[in-house]
Amino acid sequence: MSDHNRDPFLFRTENLSKLYPDGQVHALEDVSISVRRGEYVAIMGPSGSGKSTLLNLLGALDLPTSGEVYFDGQPLSKIRRLEQLRSQKFGFVFQSFYLLPILTAVENVQVPMFEGTLSASVRVSRAKELLELVGMGHRINHMPQKLSVGERQRVAIARSLANDPIALLADEPTGNLDSVSAEGVFDLFDHLHREQGMTIVLITHDEEFGHLAQRTIHMQDGRVKSEELCQERRIRTPLPPFAV
Amino acid sequence: MRFYTFVFKNVIRRRVRSTLTVIGMAVAVGAVVALVGISHGFERSFMQIYERQKVDLIIQQRGVKQKLTSVLDIELGAKIAEIPGVKRVDSGLVDFTSMDELGPVGVLVQGWEHDSPLLRALNVQPGGRLLKNDDQKCVLLGERLATSLEKNVGDTLSIFDDETYTVAGIFKSNTVYENGSMVVLLRDLQRFMGREGQVSGFTVIVEKPDDEAEIERIQHDIEDLAKNLEVTPTAEFVNSTTEIQVIRAIAWITSAVALVIGAVGMLNTMIMSVFERTREIGILRAIGWGRWRVVRMILMESILLSIAGGVVGTVGAISLTRLLANHPAVGGMVSGDVAPSVVVQGFVIALCVGLLGAAYPAYRGAKLLPTEALRHE
């Protein structure tokens, strides 16, 4: 796809709905949102408002009941190998970290790289670089259970960057962290957004952290309730040059 | 880190789970190898008894497939010997007796003439001797039986309703079945069984064992001597004898039962071990692993665990079989050697069932949407 025809949005949803088969509840109802390249968006709302469902659909972790998700202008329903998208374009950060307990920090970071073309030695050096980037260079050979929860989340963030994604999707990344660790994580996101122009879609309960993003989307009962631009933030972190 | 290293670490570092899976597999493989090994060994040793005799024709009462129930007149032996082409005729009586020391397990007793080539062929251990015509109440014990009874040459033992016999020698046979048996003079066994003048059958050695037409002619000549005679070439006899057929059937049934139990055990172990990893599969799928890579990881782990289970199970089964072979009560019946084919069979089953048991839950896990797998508790 040439730049001329390029969709101005990295993510776009059209009338997205998700109905879970077990409960007759609409987790998501008629949601249409868009996220620009290089944008930092926070999705906020109370529990059960559909935030995580929306993020899972954006990240091709789940399929909608109706509606469509577009990534870079392409409808996800037309993409056969969604795992390639998840592997090469997205980085995921979860509230529960989801590190593999039997692997050290540096090994955990390499797990997504098996789907790429890097050699074993390059995988190791890249994993070390990423751990350095998230401030975990001194604990690369520690098992997850020997790390604090904040450190585990940093390792998980390093893992999410393993295949050099263009978008980071984070579901309550600080939900299990104390305030100091949480600040560290948001500093990292800020750095990734500001220095690397990464598109970040973040779910958080926390108003304070939510407003660190450029834009917040408020959800309630499976619908978008409101959207808000965080003016102050926009001034502090201007969009990278390649963003539309 | 290479993908294979990752798979290896997955197995090595999950010590408890891997150990439990290996134990589960080992028990199943061990059951198959031990049971199949024991039944095959039993069949093999029984076959060797007949094959070793090197006789050309076996004569029994018509319609009777078991030596034990065959009854023939000993005088027939002299008539058979007169048939042209017959080199030698020997008679024998076979029965079972029980001994207090060995509990309910019966002991095979063979009654032979002192000059029978079968008796002469026994490999008597140093210090002992074969039976002589003028021996009074002497017995030869198979090596295993002697060990079980704790008897040496010169010792006495009470058999046949409290008659005291002296151990003249201890013989070693290649077949465990014979090693657990005893040999007495034909007249002693006849007297005890109340079968004076009777034998279980005759063995015939011909002058030209390679001449099939000649053997067939002798076979007909012998059958013409009396209506109740059944004359069978040795090879045919071995295959048709009831004991062999029963043992084969038992071996087959035991093997089949062991296979079913083992396979179900292995399937259960492997399926449970993969099912409980559904969430981990969800994580791997979420961070971009394709379905095939997930399936490949689980199958490779399953192969490692199956091989480990196969090794542990086979070693355990061989140890158990040896232990059983040394046990006084069953020592004469069980061979301590498990045939390599049975070991290979155990390994192949472990690998096949291990792969099959892992393939289904791996496929199921890989097919789930990442969110479904992540929700799995």
Image: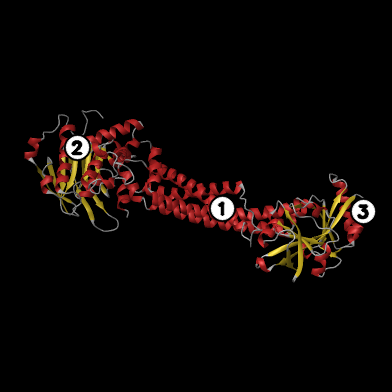
Residue position marked by numbered label 1 in the rendering? B319
Regarding mark 1 in the picture, which secondary structure is present there? helix
Q: Image check: B240 left or right of B295? A: right
Verify CB contact (< 8 Å) between mark 3 and mark 2.
Answer: no
Q: Nearer the viewer, mark 3 or mark 2?
A: 3
Q: Earlier in the sequence, mark 3 or mark 1?
A: 3
The residue at 16%/32% (across/down) is A195
Between A139 and B253, the residue placed more toward the observer is: A139
Farthest residue to the bottom: give it: B161
Q: Is residue B15 visible to us here?
A: yes
Q: Quadrant of the C terminus of chain B?
A: bottom left
- Name which residue lies at 47% across and 45% down: B303
Q: Position of residue A176 (x, y in %)?
A: 20, 50
Q: Secondary structure at mark 2?
A: strand
Q: Which residue is mark 3?
A: B83
Q: Amino acid at mark 1?
A: Ser
Gap in angstroms between the C-alphas marked 3 and 2: 105 Å
In the drawing, does residue A9 fall left or right of residue B117?
Answer: left
Per the image, the residue denoted by label 2 is A199
User: Quarter-wise, where is residue A87 in the image?
Assistant: top left
Q: Is residue A72 visible?
A: no
Q: Chain of mark 1?
A: B
**Quarter where residue B183 is shown:** bottom right
Alpha carbon distance from label 3 to label 1: 52 Å
Q: Is residue A100 above or below residue A244?
A: below
Task: Check if mark 2 and mark 1 are on a common chain.
Answer: no
Return the x and y of residue A214 as percentages of the image width and height: 12, 40
* In the displayed structure image, the side of residue B161 where residue B30 appears, left or right: left
Give amino acid for label 3. Ile
